[in-house]
Amino acid sequence: MSCDARRWPLTDQVWRQFGQFDLVMERTGVDPVFAARKAAGTAIAQARNTCLVCHRQKQCRFLLEQNEADTIMAFCPNAGFFDSCRQREPCKNSGCGV
């Protein structure tokens, strides 16, 4: 008996959505390491699950194709997660309250 991922009809959809999720993270400036570590990994797992069942996947994909990733944040249920994980500009002067 061979292990054939095609036996589960949603396999392609899941991998496509995960790729789209990763692309949104990249295009919106999310720090992937920070996102993966947030809440010991549970925050990103929950965000991926939210993306997987989102009813606006087609609109999201279209906006990504048009290089309009920031527009996605207006309706994305994961916008708060993405925003909290965005890469911040490093402090370039000594007066940064660190």
Image (cartoon, rainbow, N blue to C red):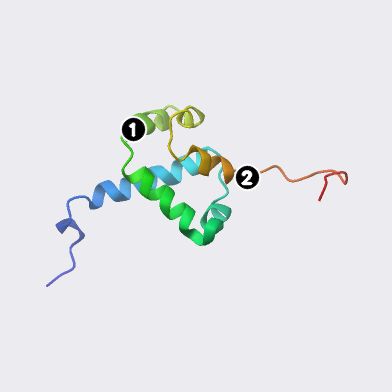
Q: Residue beneath label 1, please?
A: 56
Work out which quarter of the rendered image holds the N terminus and state it.
bottom left
Mark with earlier residue (1, 2):
1
For residue 2, above or below residue 82: below
For residue 52, above or below residue 72: below
Query: Which sits in the foreground, 30 or 49?
Result: 49
Residue at disc 2, secondary structure: loop
- For image coordinates 49% across by 37% down, the residue present is 79
Q: Residue furthest bottom?
A: 1
- For image coordinates 88% across by 46% down, the residue present is 94
Q: Is residue 34 left or right of residue 42?
A: right
Image spot of residue 50 (x, y percent): 37, 45
Image spot of residue 27 (x, y percent): 51, 38
Residue 87, numbered circle: 2
Residue 74, numbered circle: none
Q: Residues within 10 Å of mark 2 (few under 14, many from 20)?
A: some
Mark 1 vs mark 2, foreground winner is 1
Q: Is residue 30 left or right of residue 24?
A: right
- For image coordinates 43% across by 48% down, the residue present is 47
Image spot of residue 68 (x, y percent): 47, 27
- For image coordinates 15% across by 70% down, the residue present is 2
Q: Residue furthest left?
A: 1
